[in-house]
Amino acid sequence: MIRSFAIAHSASFNIGLVGLLTAVTACAGGGTAASPTPAPAASVSAGGSGARLSVTMGQMFPLHVGQTASVAGVSSDVTFRGVQADSRCPSGTQCVQAGNAEVLLEVATGGGAPVSITLNSTTPPREKALGNGILRLVSLSPTPLAGTTIEPSSYVATLCVCRE
């Protein structure tokens, strides 16, 4: 029992560490890009997952389905509309390919009409130019589990508007 707990705990730690390293390096893109600021620095203007976030360039931020972030420095609002497709390899299984998730975002720049864009978790496009920055999908949670279905409203996309 203790041995199986240690193995499970070690695997969870390793998965968490990989996720953290992925998130920390996500906005580093090319050698000159600025490192992102951790997400907790975002300010929230209302409670709950529908709260509007205020973030700055270079800062990673999580968005729940339906949630919007106002990004200073590019005068844009980014709204996470949902996941169009999710073929990522479920945790606890072996897959020939990692799979991909397609994240649907809506971006309104400078008070203009919103434009829909799709970013992918593993295949291009993973990023899109946004003003003088780059909107990048850092990660998508939760990770699929074998034999379960993810409720569409439970997705959280971690994004970053990084400097070019």
Image: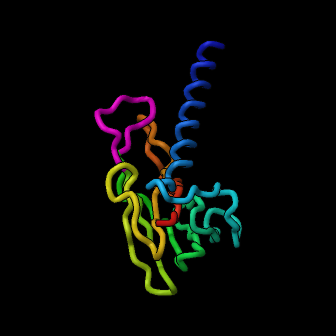
> x, y (%) of residue 66?
53, 67
Report the quarter where the N terminus lies: top right
Which of the 4 quarters of the picture holds residue 57? bottom right
Residue at the far left in the pictured view:
96
Q: Residue at x 37, y 49 (%)?
A: 122
Q: Is residue 133 left or right of residue 97?
A: right
Report the magenta stretch's main SS.
loop
Q: How many marks?
A: 0
Q: Is residue 154 left or right of residue 49?
A: left
Residue 28 can be seen, yes or no: yes
> x, y (%) of residue 112?
46, 86
User: Residue 99 or 163: which is nearer the viewer?
Assistant: 163
Color style of the picture: rainbow
Q: Is residue 160 above or below residue 70?
A: above
Q: Residue at x 70, y 72 (%)?
A: 45
User: Residue 70 or 106: which is nearer the viewer?
Assistant: 70
> x, y (%) of residue 56?
61, 69
Residue 35 colored magenta?
no
Residue 89 colored magenta?
yes
Q: Is residue 22 above or below residue 82?
A: above
> x, y (%) of residue 137?
46, 57
User: What is the magenta range?
Assistant: 88-100
Residue at the far front in the pictured view:
32
Q: Residue at x 44, y 80 (%)?
A: 114
Residue 1 can be seen, yes or no: no
Q: Is residue 152 left or right of residue 122?
A: right
